[in-house]
Image (spheres, rainbow, N blue to C red):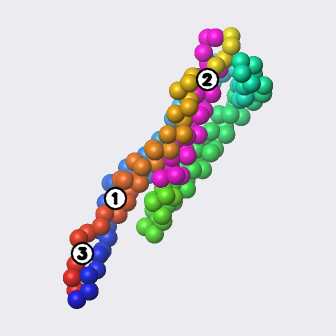
Amino acid sequence: MDDVSTAAPRSRTRLTLATVLCWVPPAIAIVFTVIWGRLLSVDLPTRWNGDEIVSTMPGWLVALGAIVIGGGCSMLATSALRNADASPAAVIFSAGFAAVATGVWIFVGSASVADDADPRISPLALISPLLVLWGLLPWALGRARRRASVEV
């Protein structure tokens, strides 16, 4: 007899929740952009050399970049969730990179909004790459469950 493993259909609720989780990071970036709108300096520091700011970028451009990158990654993650044959890595890394883009925007933007005359990014910004782990949430919720093998 053949041993056949079949995938259980994904529940609509789990898939919807996984899709919502994919779109949380760009939504957070939009919320922070709206809240900080007038507080952001005209130019945000983007590169330092020791204690000296070497280059800056317009704040609106940094915010727009984070929102576009996060939205694009979320779109890819949503598409991969809807495609049952897609690789788990597609969902995990797409949703994760959306979270990383939002995290970087929050750390860079918060340095500008601070009351200090000398904007500095918190050392906590170094954890931004760990935000890629966010992608595990939509993947875990949206993946198809494997049923026990069935003998035919």
Question: Where is residue 117, by image quadrant?
Answer: top right
- Residue marked by disc 2: 121
What amino acid is found at the position of numbered circle 2 in the picture?
Ile
Q: Position of residue 38 (x, y in %)?
A: 65, 20
Question: Where is residue 76, by image quadrant?
Answer: bottom right
Q: Residue at x 31, y 60 (%)?
A: 11
Q: Is residue 102 magenta?
A: yes
For this rendering, which residue is in front, 125 or 114? 125
Q: Tell me the element at label 3.
A: loop
Q: Residues within 10 Å of mark 1 (few under 14, many from 20)?
A: few
Q: Earlier in the sequence, mark 3 or mark 1?
A: 1
Q: Residue at x 22, y 78 (%)?
A: 150
Q: Is residue 13 above or below residue 9?
A: above
Q: Earlier in the sequence, mark 2 or mark 3?
A: 2
> What is the distance, in whole Å, between disc 2 and disc 1 at their CAs?
41 Å
- The mark found on residue 149 in the picture is 3
Say whether residue 73 is left or right of residue 41: left
Q: Position of residue 48 (x, y in %)?
A: 72, 25
For this rendering, which residue is in front, 75 or 125? 125
> What is the distance, in whole Å, between disc 3 and disc 1 at their CAs?
23 Å
Say whether residue 39 is left or right of residue 85: right
For this rendering, which residue is in front, 4 or 34? 4
What amino acid is found at the position of numbered circle 1 in the picture?
Arg
Q: Tell me the element at label 2.
A: loop
Q: Residues within 10 Å of mark 2 (few under 14, many from 20)?
A: some
- The mark found on residue 12 in the picture is 1
What amino acid is found at the position of numbered circle 3 in the picture?
Ser
